[in-house]
Image (cartoon, rainbow, N blue to C red):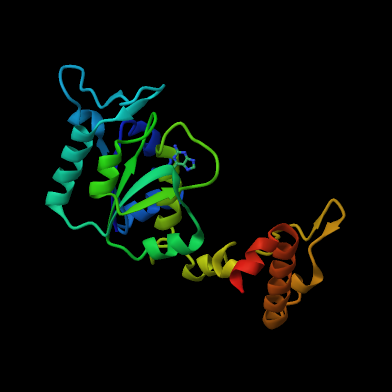
Amino acid sequence: MRIDIITVLPELLESPLGHSIMQRAKDKGLLEVHLHNLRDYGIGKHKQVDDYQYGGGAGMVMMCEPLANCIEDLFAERQYDHCIYMTPDGQTLKQGMVNQLSLNENLLIICGHYKGIDERIREKYVSLEISIGDYVLSGGELAAAVLVDAIGRLIPGVLNDETSALFDSHQDNLLAPPVYTRPSDFQGMQVPDILLSGNDAKIEEWRFEQAVERTRQRRPDMLEEGE
Ligand code: 6GU
């Protein structure tokens, strides 16, 4: 998969996407992330990318031309499955949407800043608007990093044990069950006997029950959604 990201702060994305599983996905040639500095498309001597909003009011708006020129350059290179705009007024990101997006070949992500981008860019180019939750970030970059991480780990071959994503919290509308590692006795607190029993069928059953119970207690809304 190839993901192109348009941003005024590429530095903010380099580190989150340059370690651990995301770096491994890139090293294996399964994920390519290309950062495009919108400033390179800025207007005039000051490489301007934002301007005052029509109608007045505090806060700058990202201008049409730099974004349109950058997007057109990328559109000329390849066909994108989606042009995604990261915005707090977008659709709230859920695992189901992440699963769907992980099946694509080429994604383009636009990170907004200030008051956001000119509405005409949304109308003309954007096919999907995504928010990562009901709170406001100072820019779309950290949200884009969250989205790319969530998608990237689902690309086949990225995770070591390919089945492990199947048991993540939120796959199947259930939270994940509790997990334990050595020692079996930590300051008098024991690992549940069942996990030491070697009975795989019983262990699987126990994990499922724990997942359901944990979801019922913490996120009953998820059980209703799944029905
Ligand atoms: Cl995608 N962008 C910004 N700026 N804030 C957010 C967000 C996105 N999702 C939640 N809050």
Residue 161 visible to an observer of this rendering: yes
- From the top left corner, tell me how far across and down residue 131 is, in percent: 46, 47
In the rendered image of this protein, does residue 196 appear above or below residue 187?
Answer: below
**Residue displayed at 49% across by 67% down:** 161
Q: Quadrant of residue 58?
A: top left
In the rendered image of this protein, does residue 66 appear above or below residue 58?
Answer: below
Q: Is residue 120 left or right of residue 209?
A: left
Nearest the viewer among 90 and 16 is: 90
Q: Residue furthest left?
A: 76
Q: Quadrant of residue 154?
A: bottom left
Q: Is residue 212 left or right of residue 193?
A: left
- From the top left corner, tell me how far across and down residue 15 is, in percent: 41, 37
Q: Residue furthest right?
A: 188
- From the top left corner, tell me how far across and down residue 179 is, in percent: 69, 61
Q: Residue furthest top?
A: 45
Q: Quadrant of residue 103?
A: bottom left
- From the top left corner, tell me how far across and down residue 145 is, in percent: 42, 44
**Residue displayed at 17% across by 47% down:** 74
